[in-house]
Image: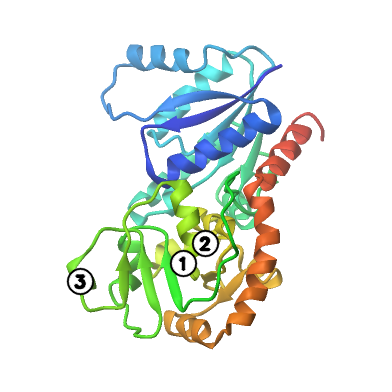
Amino acid sequence: MNIYITNINGVGGTAQVAQNMIANIAARYFNARPMGIYHYDWPDEPDESRNARLDGIIAPLQAGDILIIQMPTWMPNPWTMALLDHIAAYGAHVVIFIHDIESQMNHAWANQLQGEISIYNRSELIITHSQQMLDFLRQHGLTVQKSVVLGIMDHPTKMDLGPLPTYKPVMTYAGPNDPKAAFIKSWNSDDVKLRIYDHQHDWGKDKNIDFIGWHEDSELLIDLRQNAGFGLVWSDDPYWNNYMKMNSSFKLSTYLAAGIPVIARPSLTQAKLIQDEQLGLLADNMADAQKQVLAMSPQQYQQMVKGIDRYANIIREGIFTKRALATALYKLFNK
């Protein structure tokens, strides 16, 4: 029996980085073999061509093997259903690891939910980010009985990130300006600096904002640790905020892996974890967040980052994913 895990390419951004990391953790701890899925745009692809492509992707499978499918595949739902049809012919066990529910990320995609759940229902076991995500899916038609909850995303790294962070009245948003982050354009604090990993924008002129461009992961973690102050897991978009009640933001794990406190709303999936483990600050609005940052002393910050660093070691080792996969493999063959 071999274990395989899908791994997307050609998508780029956080979506690809997150799946690549999970595949690497599965390989490290479980000797899982990658099964590459390259994203392409061919809406009218003939069935013959698609079927040949799918047969090539799953060619190594044998009866009794385990295939962990990371979702979304970022391909249309009919394509993914066709992939599952081909897998079924091999008699392999299917585990679906949900990174994101596309229909809940953007209101324009809301009508895709039932198609997504139809795909999830083709698995023997499902891994979700949170109990909230699992409950939501069950309320909307998920019938898969066996499940595992991840809890929080990992962000593995073997790098020496250097000394612990020191207090700075700075908030950092690890991403570009986009509709989910409308608060960026309305930044109005002279006392708290905002740092954004994006190119320079004219609307940021004369504001207390630093545009610092795109960074590779290794550079990003070091920059966050040295300069970020606090990491923002934040959005002003109501639809996205509702989604953040059930998913695990990759930004959250990135900030924690770098060893810096996070700032989030009390509705975030991991808000209780942040509060209980003192991993950052919870605020109802940006003005409150800025006020809390300015009220924190360097000594309080230092105490917080010491605790975060101990917790971050788990994230940097990929332990949450390891635990979820180990539990999934056990449950797959046991009641």
Q: Check disc 1 and report its element: helix, strand or loop.
A: loop
Q: Amino acid at mark 2?
A: Arg
Q: Is residue 125 left or right of residue 212?
A: right
Quadrant location of residue 297?
Answer: bottom right
Q: CA distance from mark 1 to mark 2?
A: 6 Å
Q: Amino acid at mark 3?
A: Trp
Q: Which residue is mark 3?
A: 203
The mark tally for this picture is: 3
Q: Is residue 106 above or below residue 270?
A: above
The foreground one among 39 and 175 is 175
User: What residue is drawn where x is 34% and y is 52%?
Assistant: 214
The foreground one among 103 and 70 is 70
Q: Position of residue 106 (x, y in %)?
A: 37, 54
Q: Which residue is mark 1?
A: 228
Q: CA distance from mark 1 to mark 3?
A: 21 Å
Q: Which residue is mark 2?
A: 225
Q: CA distance from mark 3 to mark 2?
A: 27 Å
Of the numbered discs 1 and 3, the one sitting upstream in the chain is 3
Q: Check disc 3 and report its element: helix, strand or loop.
A: helix
